[in-house]
Amino acid sequence: MASSLLVPTVAHINKLAVYTQLGVGPYGRPTKAVLKQLQEENRRLRATTNDPGSPTSVSPYKPQPAGSGENSSTIVLPLDKPTGDHAHKTQTESPMTAPASISNISTFHGPTSTLFDDVAAGKQNNSWLSPERRATMPGVLFAEAARQKQMERINTLQNKLDFDGVEPELGLHLLNLHWNRQHHSFLVTYRPAFMRDMACNGPYFSKILLNAIYYGASKFSTRLELRKDRDDVRTAGWQFRDRVRELLGRAMDRSEIPTIQALLQMTSSLFALGDEQSAAWLYAGAAFRMVIDLGLHIDATLLPSHTKLSEEDLEIRRRVFWSAFVLDKIQSLYQGRPAALQHQDCQVPFSFLDEYEELEHWVPFAYSGADEYSGSPGYSVTTFTELCKLCIILNQVLNRVYNSRGGPDQSDVLLQDLQRLEADLNAWTNAMPVHLRLPQAIATAAVDAPPPHVLSLAAMGNMVRILLHRPFVSDGHLSSIAPEVAKSCFNACAAAATEIVRIIRLYDQAFTIRRAPYLISYATYLAATIHVRIAATRSGWSEAHSCLQTCLTVFEDGAKTNYAVRKSSTVIENLMKRMSVSLERKIGNGDYNGNGPTDLSQQGVTCPPHHALSGEYQQSRSGSTDLSYAGTALMDDIDIDAIIESFMYNQQGGAVGDGTVGGTSMSNNEYIMLDPSLGPQYSWLGMSSDVDDTLFGFHTSGLDILR
């Protein structure tokens, strides 16, 4: 019998083959690698069940309690009675226990580091996330988001939310403003995790993040007690900014996702003030460092060391990274500095699997003057996804067009970059989801407009188009070697500028332009730099004048709270002076309602009070906001040589030579100075070109004199 055991049967051979495929030893014993894999899978399965001793999973995802080991069950919130003010309880007194998370572990090290794991790096081509689990992630996240939305009210009624000493009524007021307005712009904070952990001191809640949210939302509140100066909305939330400063010192000792989110929130809020660019830049820089430290720029499903991450962890990591990526590009553009997070160095897909907010009904209660707006699906996820894609293109525009050090011999390369980037931008536009596209003729009522963040995305798409094409008009060398390219590029700029005006008019109809996000103001500024040059070539009132008047109205409304918008207004008004562009019509030949023939007054620059976005627009607030000129037909009667000459300066800020724009002669001094009343003090700026209407680095300190 013993000898018969030495003869392998067919069944033994088949079993051995199966063992070999599974990584199991020839004697039926699994290898160490397989044991480790099974142990990790067992731990994950236990963490996703209500009863760790049961082999059946009741729920696909439940947050695991911290500090209780692998064999602890998920804590279910008691619904019987409130437990008092959570803000005054310690963690041990809380009826809830914080869910465990390894999302804040710093594990990323590149190949130059002695801590680099070359064995693990060799496995990065294969995802540890199984196709089956990947397929269930959207449903898991959606269900948990819906559950946590219900728990928000329960936790609020039971006084479990930690407001960091702020009165609950005020704290909820500011949180609601944030979720309704700022949240949809960049999706920095993941609401289900934040609000859950706010009730249990979990890993995705921190007081520094809470106060950063308070600070950003305060300027949209009408409550005067939030302001240091009751008459100055710019001082709103000052106590929360001080609290962030207080907490930030301790938070800088290690990288954590809530700290990154807080820094990004502060970056956005401070930058919108216009005179806080240094603070915004430093906060953003610290956030980007933490992003790299935590390895958020690498797809976690490719890192063997990250197999313990839950579905929620993976979703949050992706959202935080792409929020940082988007804000990095906007900061780089506004400050005129290289981007910190380069797309070629990142490996994070922009697939956001929690779509709970995509079709959730959104009503603009955080927007004044939107009483007639009945609401709309939020479209938050697809809007943010398209924003990420657009910022990848913007990243290339900044690198290839604005940060390029190529000389005259690089002109052909720049023209090739123009063609490639223009194709990318057109592809992005054509692939836009239908529900995010604006109809060519917006003639519907304001109540049918998409949410503000969708309009902001549309404005930014046209903004990137101007950023890409205008240098090929304003750069004398490029326009001289390729005059046809210069003409087509200005045509693209004019069409984009017209579309921006159309968007902001619709924005004002639906939500009012007052306190619009700074992205809208910057897009308006770019459009104004184009419309003022078109208006300079017209002998009478034109749509360019109407669009320009709309732009100045946006600046007037935004300048009350934003110094950068004041700069925009000053720059454009001085360009109008230099080019003898007036927005005043002669009485008798026409009126502000656009009836009859119109001519410009030649009495200098006289801008009427901008109580409406334009004369024509005031008449049509209840009707269409469509503009008639766009596309190639726009260029038929434009003097492109005069347009190009209006951009030309030498390296010291002086003109290439005397020239004319719109039939008006300009001297070198008029080219140099934005405002003759300022005298020669601008000569020290040392700007190489476009000192009066620069695009890249509009927030540079050299323009602070324009406040």
Image (tube, grey):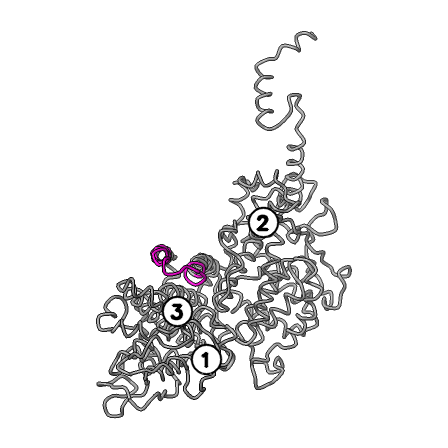
Q: Which mark is residue 683?
A: 1
Residue 547: percent from left, percent from top: 33, 77
Q: Residues within 10 Å of mark 1 (few under 14, many from 20)?
A: few
Report which residue position mark 3 lands on. 449
Q: How far across and down, in percent of the image, does residue 184 sit?
A: 50, 64
Q: Is residue 446 visible?
A: no
Please, what is the dominant secondary structure of the magenta stretch? helix
In the image, which is nearer the foreground, mark 2 or mark 1? 1
- Report the amino acid beneath label 3: Ala
Sequence-earlier tag: 3 or 1: 3
How many neighbours does mark 2 have within 10 angstroms: few (below 14), some (14-19), or many (20 or more)? many
Q: Which residue is mark 2?
A: 311
Q: Position of residue 267 (x, y in %)?
A: 57, 68
* Lower position in the chain sequence, tag 2 or tag 1: 2
- Label 3, label 2: how far apart the Cα atoms are: 34 Å
Residue count near mark 3 (Cα–Cα under 10 Å), binned few <14, some 14–19, many ≥20: many
